[in-house]
Amino acid sequence: MLNESNQQSETKPESKTDSKTKTDKPSIVNVAVAVIHYKDQYLLGFRDATQHQGNRYEFVGGKIEADESAAQALIREVAEETGILLDNNTIVKLGRLHHDYGDKQVSLQVYKIELTEEQYEQHKHREQGLEGQALTWVSKSQLLAGEYHLPAANKTILEWLKLPSKIVITYPLAHFGTHTDAAAAWLQYHQENLASESWVYIRLKDANSKHLAEQLITSRPDILAILPNDKEQPLDIEGSLTAKKTETGQRIIAKHLTHSTLMQCFNEVGSSTALTQSLSKDYQLIVSCHDIASITAANQLASMRIQNALPPVIGAFVSPVLATQTHPDDAPLGWEAWSELAELADMPVIGLGGLEPAMLNQALQYGGISVAGIRQFI
């Protein structure tokens, strides 16, 4: 694969011509990266110790030629390196990562592909690729735990791979307004009905009830919580949970930025604002996007956080896909328009709005990686 290690090993000695044009902006080398898996088994190649940045594992992939799309390059490179034919597989975009190597700028276009059982059975015992590189299948848990040493550029990819196929959003507190004690009813309902180990966006829409989020996380230590950005709905949970982290692990997986907050991160000419710099430096972010402008802002934010070695933007809720009961006056995007926005995003896209878990395959077909919702997800 032509990834971080290959890019650096390709550097040639500087010629006189090179020195004269050294200040010229280098062209971008586009690279297609294939995250190939079958269920929880992931395929990695291994760089020989004699190669630059040797003794590292890597995902399969390579350079996108001028006359081909990223998907076409992916199919070609995987076939050349492993013999696996992906022509009929669903190729889902995870995101894009941009890196500047000084003499060369690289754009890694990352895709996730699940093999069929037949493909996996055919290739699972092959220990060597068609170009002589070692191949190995590793479990997702081992991969995410860092047991396989990958180039630094892959760090964000591993965070993307943690995204579940569905994300639950809690009901707003107002939904339980007919109960004598709405707060108690809200808490009991979610304590009893949230699936084990689920990712949950705790969205109360009530600044005076922020204590409920803490109570839910404390009573359900198995869930991974997404919380509103501090400036939107301050939740003083981190301090109270710090002492318990050794017992329960990290339970706050990300902070969420609404569409309006995301747009406030950049001024009218696209420069970052003070808000951008004040966003959580301890947590990953998930953003909400509804149009091209917000997708562009999300991409800018994601790039800035990677450049500053901050936790990445791991996903974007792009909505509304379909009509919703919550916002009946909002015109739905529809799958085609939603797909066009998803293609523009540099991070994994999560479908939201009028969906149900059974629509995951449809979301995959249109370029998403996950689906989210309230009514059909709890």
Image: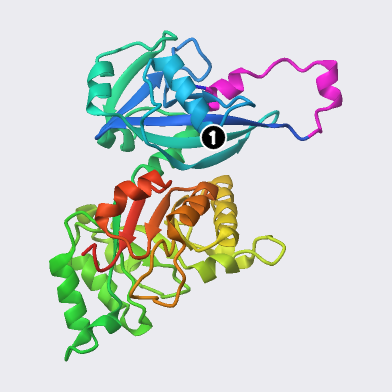
Residue at point 16%, 91% (across, down): 180
**Would you say residue 164 is visible in this rendering?**
no
Identity of the amino acid at label 1?
Leu
Residue 325 placement, left or right of 96: left
Neighbor class of circle 1 (other Cα within 10 Å; few <14, some 14-19, many 20+) is many
Residue 55 position (above or below residue 154):
above
Residue 9 placement, left or right of 246: right
Residue 114: quadrant of the picture? top left
* Residue 299 is inside the magenta segment: no
Instruction: Give the image location of residue 367, x and y in percent.
Output: 43, 46
Residue 47 position (above or below residue 322):
above
Quarter placement of the C terminus? bottom left
Kindly give the residue lying farthest to the left in the view shown.
Answer: 192
Circle 1 residue? 108
Disc 1 on helix, strand or loop? strand
How is the structure coloured here? Answer: rainbow
Residue 250: quadrant of the picture? bottom left
Residue 286: quadrant of the picture? bottom left
Residue 248 placement, left or right of 320: left
Judging depth in this view, the residue of 130 and 340 nearest the camera is 340
Instruction: Give the image location of residue 240, x and y in percent.
Output: 29, 68
Judging depth in this view, the residue of 149 and 368 nearest the camera is 368
**Would you say residue 68 is visible in this rendering?**
yes
Instruction: Give the image location of residue 243, x and y in percent.
Output: 26, 61
Residue at point 47%, 30% (across, down): 33
* Residue 21 is inside the magenta segment: yes
Residue at point 25%, 68% (across, down): 375
Judging depth in this view, the residue of 67 and 299 nearest the camera is 67
Label count reads: 1
Instruction: Give the image location of residue 12, x and y in percent.
Output: 70, 16
The stretch in magenta equals 2-24
